[in-house]
Amino acid sequence: MTLTFFLTIIRIFSNSFLNVEQKRLSQRVSSLETNFKTYFILCMFLLPVLLLFYLKSLSAQVLLLALIGGIFGAAGNACLIKALKLGELSILGPVNSYKAIFALIFGVLFLREIPGINTLSGMALIILGSYFVFETSNEGFGGKFFRRKDIQLRMLALILTALEAVFIKKIIILTDAVFSFILWALSGCLFAFVFLKLNKPKTPKAPSDKICNKTLNKYKILPLRCFLSPAFLVLIMQMSTNLIFEKIPVSAALSLFQLSNILNVFLGCKLFNEKHLLKKLAGSAIMITGSAIIILNG
């Protein structure tokens, strides 16, 4: 239990600071480029590990699960980064709590993780808390708010990454957390590259500030070193996620991760000058209460 708690803290902080890096990069390049280059840096280090230590353990079943999960993961990450570009971190961060609801549904369908009354009560608290967070937007809590492009992209990212989590859990059951992480990165890189080539995003405008302490003459691409920080944060976040998935059910794990809501709200307000800090913190606290109920009954 102590190890799970420690891994959760690591996962919360790495995820929140990853969102900050993704939001910053999304102002300079397309979400698809950020998505692919983050995966690509990981694969530069992980591909030799696969070839040296895990190649003989690769089966057709595991490969198929990894490829399907990779499609969901790459698409979900691309939607998330695009949403961060368009919206506020202090609102989009708490939206992540809805992943627990989607994960519960998919956990029931695919993993037969049946929730009890207390777990459902926790889900209700998550929705109640989100009212206070979303009500701070210009649209308020209602249909107009959920029609916003950034919210729709964030919700789509939730569904895709919740599906991805189910396949990650399946691979972990068949192999282990490390092997699952390697396959996650390689398959995600493959499909992130496909999405990048299919969409061919327009060249973004040149920003006024310096990138990686060097002003580039042309802003068609960023140097690969600019993506080292998000790649490192992804490494920490996903590896800790996989290790947690080894120990507790998917729905409970994804609910536990919602503790990052408060950190996302704080970082969004402090780093990007977003408003209504106290109200968003209060709503996030209610969401965390709902998550805690789910965890205690997980």
Image: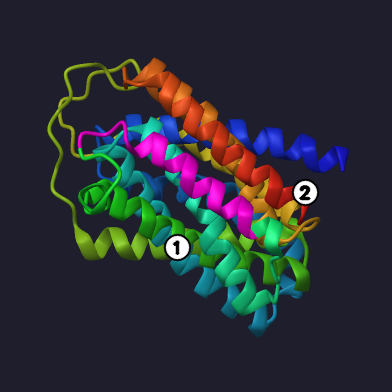
Q: How crowded is the residue under tag 2: few (<14 C-alpha within 10 Å), some, or many (20+)? A: few
Q: How is the image coloured?
A: rainbow
Quick check: 206 left or right of 235? Answer: left
88 versus 194 height, above or below: above
Image coords of residue 127 (percent x, y): 47, 49
Q: Viewer-proximal residue, 43 or 255?
A: 255
The extreme right residue here reads 1
Quick check: 220 left or right of 80? Answer: left
Residue 92, by quadrant, is top left
Which element type, helix, strand or loop, lies under badge 2?
helix
Residue 258 visible, this orientation: yes
Dividing the image into 4 quarters, which one contains the C terminus?
A: bottom right
- Give the Cα separation between the discs numbered 1 and 2: 24 Å
Q: Which residue is mark 1?
A: 159
**Mark 1 vs mark 2: which is more N-terminal?**
1
Image coords of residue 105 (percent x, y): 56, 69
- Select label 1 or label 2 by which is in front: 2
Residue 17 visible, this orientation: no
Q: Which residue is mark 2?
A: 296
Which element type, helix, strand or loop, lies under badge 1?
helix
The magenta stretch is 120-138
Quick check: 53 left or right of 227? Answer: right
Residue shown at 73%/65% (left/top)? 172
Quick check: 224 left or right of 58? Answer: left
Residue shown at 63%/74% (left/top)? 108
